Image (spheres, rainbow, N blue to C red):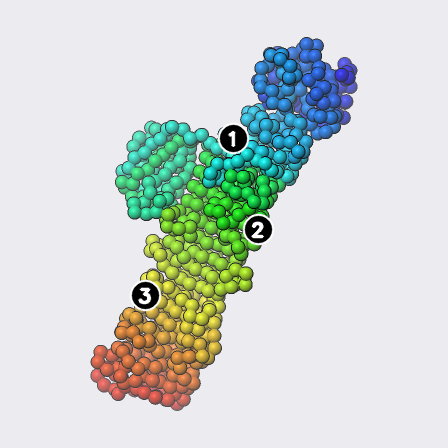
Amino acid sequence: MSSLGSSPSSSRRRLLAAGGLGGLLLAGTAAAGTASAAPDDDRNGGGPREVSTSVPNVAALLRLDPRRFPTDAVVLVAGYHAAGDGGGMVVRWDPRSRLAVNGGTVLADPSPRRDGRWIQVHDGVMDFRRFGILDDKVPADAALDAMVNDPYIHRVEAHTDLLFVKRHTFGRSRIVLDFGGHTVRTTGIEKNTHDNPFGAVLYFRGKVTDTVVTYPLAETVIELTDVFPVPDAGAFEVGQWWTVEIDPIAGGGTYERELQKLVEITQIVDGKHIRADYLNGWELTAGRRITWTRVEPVRRADVQNMVFFGAGANDDEYTGSHPIAYEYAVRCDVDGIEATGSFWPVVMRRWCTHFVTARSSLKNPPTVMYGGAGYLTQQIYCLYGRVEDCVSSNARHLNDLTASAYCHVVNCHGDGDDQGGNPFTTHGQYEHDLLFEGNSGLMDIANSGVLWGTSAKRITVRDHTCSWFVAGTKITDLTLENVRVIPRPTFDPGGTLQVNADGVQMRGCVARTFAIGQRSNRSTRPNIVEGCTFDLPAKQVLVQTPVSNTVHFRDCLFTGVDGAILRGSGEVDFDSCTLVGAGPAAAPLEVGSAVLRLTASTLTDTGILLSAVRDQNLHVSAGTRLSGANGAGALLSRGAGAGVLRWHLAGAASTTDGAHVRLAGGVNHWMAGQTRFTGGRLELRPEAFGGASSALHTGCVEDGVTRTAMPADGARVATSGNLAI
């Protein structure tokens, strides 16, 4: 024991030189606060106190005879195991304390003496080194529990690598765990339970109360309202947090329900209505059963700057480890987690709202084949989240949003996705109003299966690059802007892009194997594909059979056209588009659409074959130009179907050495005017214009055209009044 002397100025100068602890002492004693006992009260102590003595380490502290010290005597400890090892602290003596000894904030001689503790003096910021944890050779679990569960500690810092062998559950709010960029290892961690992504090293969970309100809706809850009917608004208070959940859709999938969220009550509207901080994404009809459960969420529990290593390369759901999980949590952010080998999601969230996951990564998880494993982030029943500046390598998913809404995923990038999963996904459990911007990596939306409903709404993807993008399920009002799907030989050399014709709008996108399907019909906005480029493989079904809604293509370029198919019954418009065949022998565009409109468009080495599988209308107008040749030998022709076909050419131009049109049978109504035909042949065979058929071919220019076959003029046919040159 070495005395520091009695001079106040001398004491302070020597403390300031003792590893920075003098500042802590002066701040701590002046503020009169402690972490693990009731705050020191200067009214009883007469103001700031001077250090009674100093010791080199904790062992020396515990050898002191506390009977020699008055209440609140202050001792400077220069290190935990040795002076200067970073575990130094300032403590005060409380002879009446019976607090549990924890090896850090509460210290005592292990002798049987009952009362009296050395209480660490601090400003609410704590360090593992002050619990004797100086490296990752010994577990830090007990120290972690002591610090996080101490209400006087608001920030926990790591200044060395650490080892954890326990899975910790906390209900603590308003705390920051900052690992300072140091490594956390979990070798030998205790076993997890079955299928438990919440068995993380750090699991923050709010409290679910037994206050439950459940009832059938007395009125329909409309889309995008924040007002909900309740039996008695008196059961709710402004500022309370509740989970709200609708019953599963009758006849739907096991987990198919439109509403599962954690919300805050913001207003009591009247005796039968409350307002929550959420604009409902889906209409809920009267009579559906809804359940509210009051919760006391964890708030502002943040985790930062951790380098995490999973327990081992051959881990399974029991032996594997992952760092962070939140449930029933509000404004809990994660930043700077660099994970390798995490089994379950690095950051697992359920029933969370108002959060950020930033600057984090995952590489080489033990498996990408086990359901739910190998993710960087997963969010279930979440609101108002932002995932930004994250990366994944050889993972199943970088980001998964399930039954979540109003979330953003920005500047995130997944590589090594050839054998794993797609970095960006949603389950299809009625997600809505999500934004993905500036990301790269495979992506699918609402594609996890019918158990969840395969439904989503108002998803926007901007500036995305990948080699596979699938959004063909019941996705309403999908918006894609500058999405580039580039084929690569290691995964999907076809460069697939699939969308659902239910309010889809695409602008500036690029793909090869492009397809439009339809599995829902909920939207009121048109399906528009604008300014996009598609290099189609042979016989690509561009518009699939189920499509009954109109699809508008504007200012698009299609190359490699060779037997591409518009199979759906819905109308298709090409406005100011360019379609280029794979070559002069390529098959024409095969059309099954009820209506096809070509406006101010250019078709080269391709053409139109109406399949006649139904009654069809073709409109070629406003400067549309057809030229070149195709494998059918005619730029316009019909298939073998029995449908009635109506052909209308107005203000168009056709140039070919083959047939401009070949109609050899079926019921046809041909009308061509103000159209210029250059070279080639007209083959309107008489057998195609008997009975109910008709033809009006007049006011056209036929420049070097041979009329190989034309029907005779009569009551239903007129072919005169043209300029032949």
Q: Which residue is mark 2?
A: 393
- Say if mark 3 contacts mark 1, CB within 8 Å: no
State the image coordinates of residue 422 (x, y, percent, origin top left): 50, 53
- Which is nearer the N-term, disc 3 or disc 1? 1
Residues at marks 3 and 1, CA–CA distance in whole angstroms:
57 Å
- Secondary structure at badge 3 equals loop
Q: Nearer the viewer, residue 180 or 661?
A: 180
Residue at x 34%, y 69% (from the top left corner): 592
| The N terminus, quarter of image | top right
Residues at marks 2 and 3, CA–CA distance in whole angstroms:
42 Å
Quarter of the image where one finds residue 58 = top right
How crowded pointer 3 is (Cα within 10 Å; few <14, some 14-19, many 20+) is rated as: many
User: Total of numbered circles in the picture?
Assistant: 3
Q: Which residue is mark 3?
A: 569
In this rendering, the answer to whether 10 lies above or below 464 is above
Front of the two marks 3 and 1: 1
- Secondary structure at badge 1 equals strand
Q: Which residue is mark 1?
A: 170
Q: Amino acid at mark 1?
A: Phe
Residue 369 shows up from this direction? yes
Residue 524 shows up from this direction? no
Q: Nearer the viewer, residue 671 or 569?
A: 569
Residue at x 62%, y 31% (from the top left corner): 139
State the image coordinates of residue 352 (x, y, percent, origin top left): 46, 38
| The C terminus, quarter of image | bottom left
